[in-house]
Image (cartoon, rainbow, N blue to C red):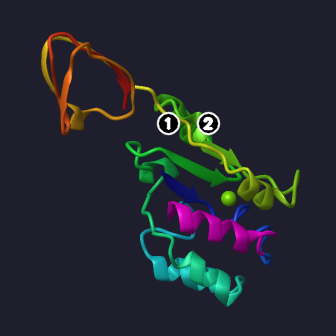
Amino acid sequence: MNVYLDIDGVIMANDREPARHVHEFLEYVVSKYQAYWLTTHCHGDLSYTTHHLSQWLKPETLKLAAKIRPTDWQVFKTEAIDWKIPFLWFDDQLFDFGKADLVKHRVLDSWIEVDFSRDVDQLQKIVRNFPRPAVSLNWQVAIWPGEINLTSWRNILILLAPAAEVKKEKITTDCILILGYR
Ligand SMILES: [Mg+2]
């Protein structure tokens, strides 16, 4: 899973103060997931982002931030999202186009609204109960005799293959039903 992070309103509570629990939050995210910046403070150049954050974050927190990869986008943040990989996107704002893009890809729930005006300790709560990404269910169904190469399938939910012979990643059977999603 990828995690996309805004800075203003997520890493920073305001112009001058880091968000509460930001160290704990980044520690959790970078240790478990591949994180990317998705912020106006990053357009492909990580040194610019790091320099900006170095004004506010403690050195130990900055070390965690250094593990976050840059993205580049021109007009809309969603340009930088890799739709093939489940993700969470932490941001305090979602503009119409971004929302439409998430809806189009059926992953609106992957956007996690961060709103410190409602809860200054939100990052701590996120770490304690980390959300799951929305998964776009592109269903695949296959019923046919023969051999199926399972490497083209991900997340197989149901596999009915009476008398199937499974060898490595291939199944040979007289009749097979696979229901899965990508
Ligand atoms: Mg923001």
State whether residue 103 is above or below residue 122.
above
Residue lying farthest to the left in this orientation? 146
Question: Which corner quadrant of the figure contains ligand 1?
Answer: bottom right
Crowdedness near tag 2: few (<14), some (14–19) or many (≥20) residues, C-alpha within 10 Å: some
- Pick whichever of labels 2 and 1 is earlier in the sequence: 1
Question: Could you tell me residue 129's position as x and y percent?
Answer: 73, 50
Which residue bears the numbered disc 2? 109
Question: Could you tell me residue 56's position as x and y percent?
Answer: 72, 83
The answer to which of 36 and 29 lies nearer the viewer is 29
172 lies left or right of 20:
left
Which residue bears the numbered disc 1? 101
SS label for mark 2: helix
- What range is drawn magenta here? 18-36
Q: Which amino acid does label 2 sit on?
A: Asp
State whether residue 22 is above or below residue 75.
below
71 lies left or right of 15:
left
